[in-house]
Image (cartoon, helix red, strand yellow):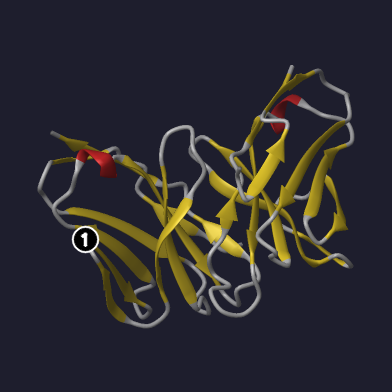
Amino acid sequence: DADVTQTPRNRITKTGKRIMLECSQTKGHDRMYWYRQDPGLGLRLIYYSFDVKDINKGEISDGYSVSRQAQAKFSLSLESAIPNQTALYFCATSETGRNTGELFFGEGSRLTVL
Amino acid sequence: QKEVEQNSGPLSVPEGAIASLNCTYSDRGSQSFFWYRQYSGKSPELIMSIYSNGDKEDGRFTAQLNKASQYVSLLIRDSQPSDSATYLCAVSYNFNKFYFGSGTKLNVKP
């Protein structure tokens, strides 16, 4: 089983619908991140969290919200999906201290908004 | 806005050759630098990290950092077809946030 698990892996939805992408990890890391990847644009940071009570906006947080339900769970929500949110979304984790720079990625959630 | 620039490629090299991947960054305060490899349809995985000027070698991979020129590179010696992937450069100022380039696609031809 993957250490960082994302659900769903693929989702097609319509404009205006609310969507939640979930991420859970068994690595015991305190830091969790949500990125989106678009062709030609690389990975862009949406939100990140360093512990359950800590939530921070990234580069492109508009239109998204997050919830850190537990140390191991970090969810990304699109309150009213729009077509330009069609992308591949990655959850990632890292640990504070040694090797903080290494991000461990989930397998990705491909979202299509029609 | 912190920018990380990479040539999108594709970079094509024959098997056994040296592949050279380059990355420039805009924030002079950047302190840590990473190379991730992403196979098609897969998630990125870390292959190298470098924090000080100079070279860092790990097997067939060498990362090079020049902070004065705001430049980081990755050399892959004895390139193999299995090295064909997209290579992402990532930069961080304080290990809190990581800024990624758009990636360079490498094709290693048998």
Identify the residue shown where x is 23% and y is 64%.
B59
Q: Which quadrant holds the C terminus of chain B?
A: top left
The residue lying toward the viewer, choosing from B33 and A4, is A4
Q: Is residue A62 visible?
A: no
Q: Position of residue B102 (x, y in %)?
A: 47, 47
Q: In the shown orientation, is residue A8 left or right of residue B28? A: right
Q: Is residue B39 visible?
A: yes
Q: Position of residue B21 (x, y in %)?
A: 28, 55
Q: In the shown orientation, is residue A7 left or right of residue B38? A: right
Location of residue A29 with respect to A72 vertically, above or below: below
Q: Which quadrant holds the N terminus of chain B?
A: bottom right
Q: Position of residue B52 (x, y in %)?
A: 38, 83
Q: In the shown orientation, is residue B50 left or right of residue A61? A: left
Residue B95 lies in what quarter of the image? bottom right
Q: Position of residue B81 (x, y in %)?
A: 21, 38
The residue lying toward the viewer, choosing from A68 and B74, is A68
Q: 10 Å neighbourhood of mark 1: few (<14), some, or many (≥20)?
A: few
Q: In the shown orientation, is residue B84 left or right of residue A44? A: left
Identify the residue shown where x is 70% and y is 53%.
A25
Q: Amino acid at mark 1?
A: Arg
Identify the residue shown where x is 37% and y is 42%.
B8
Badge 1 is on which residue? B60
Identify the residue shown where x is 62% and y is 80%.
A97
